[in-house]
Image (tube, rainbow, N blue to C red):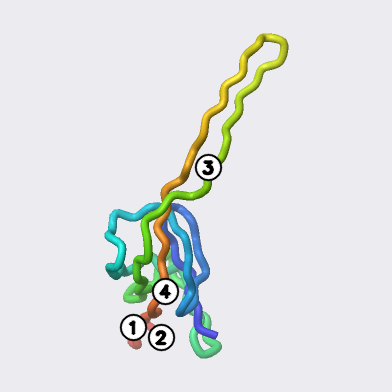
Amino acid sequence: MEYAIVKTGGKQYRVSQGDVIDVEKLPVEAGSEIELDAVLAVSKDGEFTYGSPFISGAKVIAQVHAQARDKKIRVFKYKPKTRYRRTRGHRQHYTRLQIVDIVQDSEES
């Protein structure tokens, strides 16, 4: 099974071809393609390649499906015995990506 470990938005994701993932909001339009070049590791044909910290020449090509917002969460502050209560809501922005291909230079293998 071919997969890669990619870093974007301060988080790491294990992706395979055809996966759909939600990442931190990226400044791209829906329907376009994006290249994620911060590839930490690649597993292909039973061989595992890892970088220090990134693999040069490796990239993951993804198609942007949507720019969306997550479900609302409630943030509630409370201090006992002082009548202090505050409620706020938050909706996180994210980008939904579908992984099209994992590309690795043949010179690096």
Give the residue at mark 2.
109
In front here: 19 or 4? 19
Does label 2 or label 3 sit earlier along the sequence? Answer: 3
Give the residue at mark 1.
105
Tell me which amino acid carries mark 3: Lys
Does label 1 or label 3 sit earlier along the sequence? Answer: 3
* Residues packed near mark 3 inside 10 Å, few (<14), some (14 to 19) or many (20 plus): few
Q: Are marks 1 and 3 in contact (CB under 8 Å)?
A: no
Label number found at residue 12? none
The residue positioned 65% from the left and 11% from the top of the image is 83
Tell me which amino acid carries mark 4: Ile
Tell me which amino acid carries mark 1: Asp
In front here: 95 or 44? 95
* Residues packed near mark 1 inside 10 Å, few (<14), some (14 to 19) or many (20 plus): few
Residue 57: image quadrant is: bottom left
The alpha-carbon separation of the residues under discs 1 and 3 comes to 42 Å
Say whether residue 4 is left or right of residue 32: right
Residue 70 position in % (x across, y down) = 49, 50
Report the mark closest to the observer, 4 or 2. Answer: 4
Assign a secondary structure to mark 4.
Answer: strand
Q: Are marks 1 and 2 in contact (CB under 8 Å)?
A: yes
The alpha-carbon separation of the residues under discs 4 and 2 comes to 22 Å
Which of the image's four quarters has the C terminus? bottom left
Assign a secondary structure to mark 2.
Answer: loop
Does label 4 or label 2 sit earlier along the sequence? Answer: 4
Give the residue at mark 3.
72
